[in-house]
Amino acid sequence: MGMLATMINSMALQAALESAGLQTRLQSAIEMKEISEPYVRRRAVRHLEKGRVVIFGAGTGNPYFTTDSAASLRAIEINADVILKGTRVDGIYTADPEKDPTATKFDTITFEDAYSRGLKVMDMTAFTLCMENDLPIIVFDMDTPGNLRRLMEGEQVGTIVKN
């Protein structure tokens, strides 16, 4: 059911991006030819080369893998520059800021420091994939209007995790 939920979210994202004038392609690990293309790495890279936004839906199509793991895997496969992880908070903190008012935010943190502090950035499979492939992660508040645009324009938004 989680894979299908990500497809619904992916379709909503596609509609929003297209209404803003961007060309998009939705690819899915599960065949749904009426609403998406099948995931093919070479095809995804070619769409990116043509300036299109590629949205990966339905995770990896395999049980036991989270959407974070799927995003990390796909990002590595297409040689992405960064993973953008939209959450309910504006970055990574020393503790859960929704529960601990004394939590302090990191602007930048290394993978090793986040791991040694026990900070839950994403599941360990996804986190390790990013760390081992030197793929930075930017954690930001997806509910703040304009955050994604500011990130795309190069502004420091949220927290960046890197080696």
Image (cartoon, rainbow, N blue to C red):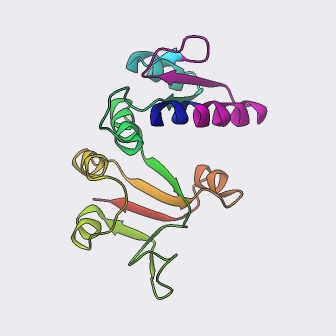
Q: Report the magenta residues as a range.
A: 8-36
Residue at position x 30%, y 48% in the image: 130
Q: Would residue 153 be seen by someone viewing this image from the given angle? A: yes
Q: Would residue 49 be seen by someone viewing this image from the given angle? A: no
Residue at position x 56%, y 62% in the image: 88
Give the quadrant of residue 146: bottom right
Q: Is residue 159 depicted above or below 134 in this figure? A: below
Residue at position x 52%, y 35% in the image: 6
Q: What is the number of callouts on the image?
A: 0
| x then y, percent, for residue 83 | 43, 47
Nearest to the observer: residue 59 or residue 91: 59
| x then y, percent, for residue 100 | 46, 83
Give the quadrant of residue 133: top left
| x then y, percent, for residue 84 | 48, 49
Is 10 part of what is drawn in magenta?
Answer: yes
Nearest to the observer: residue 1 or residue 96: 1
Residue lying farthest bottom?
A: 102
Residue at position x 55%, y 11% in the image: 33
Q: In the displayed structure, does residue 36 sit left or right of residue 15? A: left
| x then y, percent, for residue 116 | 21, 71
Image quarter hosting the C terminus: bottom left
Q: Is residue 106 depicted above or below 46 in this figure? A: below
Q: In the displayed structure, does residue 51 sit left or right of residue 131? A: right
Q: In the displayed structure, does residue 126 sit left or right of residue 17? A: left
Nearest to the observer: residue 78 or residue 85: 85
Give the quadrant of residue 114: bottom left
Q: Is residue 86 depicted above or below 11 in this figure? A: below
Is 107 part of what is drawn in magenta?
Answer: no
Q: In the displayed structure, does residue 132 sit left or right of residue 135? A: left
